[in-house]
Image: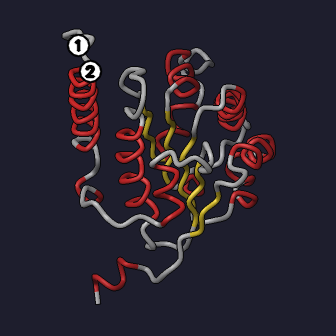
Amino acid sequence: MPVPSTDPSDMDDWRDERRDEAVSAFAAQIPALYRQQITLDADVAAWADRAADAPVSLFLWGALGVGKTHSAWQATRRWIASQFAGAYRGTPVVQTWRSTALFDALRPDDAGGTPRRLMRALQTADLLYIDDIAAARVSPTGWTQERLYEIFDERYINQLPVLITSDVQPGQISPIVGERVTSRAAEIFRGGVVHLGGADRRKAVAA
């Protein structure tokens, strides 16, 4: 990667190029259904733009079909762009997971363990986005919940943001993620719980 000159205007142009590249790369990963840019809820937009009083993490909840996932993908795209304001700290690393796929990936492998590379990536990514957390299947042994706690606890300690969408409120996810994760989530998402209301958009399209 070319090193920018020391001229302030050249540095700004160079940083803007890195921002546009990062946003474009992420936009290409967004599922087709959610690629259209939409007007975000004010609190969601404030989080994405890293407003001065915005929380570190965000928990979006609401009924089926109100646009939680669409909002989360577009908020993440906007969040990436906001990381390039001020001093350049490198292109942010974002981990995006559907909860069902994440829970499957966290289950013990044939050797009885979880791939440490995956765990470390989930613990240290600049942003971890988990979609539809209440849809995941419960682990009968509690293994998945323990690994999830390791991830949430590490991110909480290091104040790394988490973005979650859910059909239920944070206090109602314990049957899926376990009591320890629910307790840690209460701290992680303090001040960052946003309820998205409205009608089921899917039904409106089908009508």
Q: Amino acid at mark 2?
A: Met
- Judged from the image, the secondary structure of the residue bearing numbered disc 2 is helix
Q: Element type at marker 1? A: loop
Q: Which residue is mark 2?
A: 11
- Give the residue type at disc 1: Pro
N-term mark: 1 or 2:
1
Residue 74's disc number: none
Residue 6 horizontal/vertical position (percent): 27, 11
Q: Nearer the viewer, residue 46 or 5?
A: 5
Q: Pointer 1 and pointer 2: residues touching (CB < 8 Å)?
A: yes
Residue drawn at point x = 58 percent, y = 25 percent:
123
User: Can residue 137 be spotted in the picture?
Assistant: no
Where residue 69 sits in the image (x, y, percent)? 42, 59
Q: Quadrant of residue 204?
A: bottom left
> Can you give x and y, in whole percent of width and height, for residue 122 in the image?
53, 28
Q: Is residue 44 visible?
A: yes
Image position of 100 (left or right of 204): right
Residue at x-position 75% and y-position 48%: 182
Please give the residue where the numbered disc 1 appears in the rendered image.
4
Q: Callout 2 environment at 10 Å: few (<14), some (14 to 19), or many (20+)?
A: some
Q: Nearer the viewer, residue 22 or 138?
A: 22
- Cα gap from disc 1 to disc 2, whole angstroms: 6 Å
Q: How many marks?
A: 2
For residue 16, which quarter of the picture?
A: top left
Left or right position of 182 against 78: right
Quarter of the picture containing the N terminus is top left
Which of these two is toward me, 144 or 54? 54
* 30 relative to 46 in the view: left or right: left
Q: Quick one: label 1, few (<14), some, or many (20+) residues within 10 Å? A: some
Residue 141 lies, with reference to residue 41, above or below; the image says above
Q: Residue 115 location in percent, x, y?
A: 53, 18
